[in-house]
Amino acid sequence: MSGKLKIGVLASGGGTNLQAIIDRCLDGSLPVEIVLVLSNNPGAGALERAARAGLPTCCIDHREFDNREDFDRAVVAALQSAGVELVVLAGFMRLITDIFLQAYPGRIMNIHPALLPAFPGLHVQKKALEYGARFAGCTVHFVDSGVDTGPIILQAVVPVLQDDTEESLSRRILEQEHRIYPRAIELFAQGRLRIDGRRVIIDPPLPPEESALVNPPLEG
Ligand code: GAR
């Protein structure tokens, strides 16, 4: 027994966020144990990445279930039998039900490729670009019963460049996702996160970033 926090990572797609978490576990800088990588998609690259790293995997295809509740019951059963203590949604493209939330209250995290509460939902990098936002970014938050509405743990701000495409902006946001998601998990594992209403309290607090970002810059 390692005594480390046991996490389960849920992913539907390529799994680069999963990979960032695996890499931080392998280099010893993230003291958690990935006890299960679960996908709803049999073709998910995340499952391949997990298998390559020698991690336990499980695929539960949502198309084999009549409703979201039954799918979530199967997912929760798999997580519980693996001993998962913190659920990490990393590009998991399914809405979760109260069944799931009640099994892991305050113990489900998600990463979203926008600066919430702006741009919840899907295709959000494109929406930020089309809106003309000067800043985009990503958010790690606890999951509640809404869509991308839960208490925010960490955010990274990414300036939108004049010649950005959806692809270029998404790539720069993803780089920041890979930095902040392992950090949020680390803070949880250290017992430093407490949910207080809508706010997440970090204890002891981290030194704040006090300087404002302006995009485009005022000079030049
Ligand atoms: C990431 O950009 C993540 O923020 C997003 O899916 C991508 C998964 O990439 N999640 C959502 O949009 C959730 N609403 P990955 O499979 O390479 O980690």
Image (cartoon, rainbow, N blue to C red):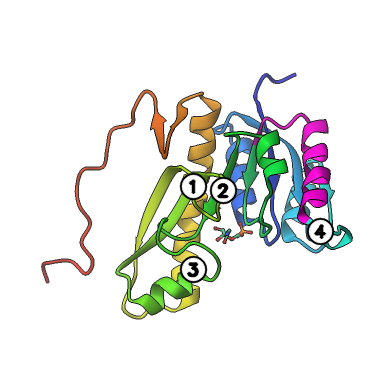
How many numbered tags mark residues here?
4
Q: Secondary structure at mark 2?
A: strand
Kindly identify which residue carries mark 1: 140
Q: Is tag 3's residue or tag 1's residue first in the polypeptide sequence? A: 3
Residue extent of the magenta highlight:
68-86
Q: Do the residues bearing badges 1 and 4 touch, measured as CB atoms within 8 Å?
A: no
Instruction: Classify 10 Å Cα crowding around label 1: few (below 14), some (14-19), many (20 and above).
Output: many
Q: Quadrant of residue 81?
A: top right
Determine the secondary structure under disc 1. strand
Q: In the image, residue 48 lies at what x, y percent?
A: 78, 55
**Which of disc 1 and disc 2 is earlier in sequence?**
2
Q: Quadrant of the N terminus?
A: top right
Q: Indicate the amino acid at tag 1.
A: Val
| Label 3 Cα neighbours within 10 Å, binned few <14 / some 14-19 / many ≥20 | many
Tell me how far mark 1 sits from mark 4, CA to CA.
24 Å
- Residue 52 appears anywhere in the view: no
User: What amino acid is labelled 3 in the image?
Assistant: Val
Residue 162, image quadrant: bottom left
| Mark toward the viewer: 4 or 2 | 4
Mark 3 = which residue?
A: 124
Q: For mark 4, give the secondary structure.
A: helix
Q: CA distance from mark 3 to mark 1?
A: 15 Å
Name the residue tied to disc 4.
62
User: Are discs 3 and 4 less than 8 Å apart at CB?
Assistant: no
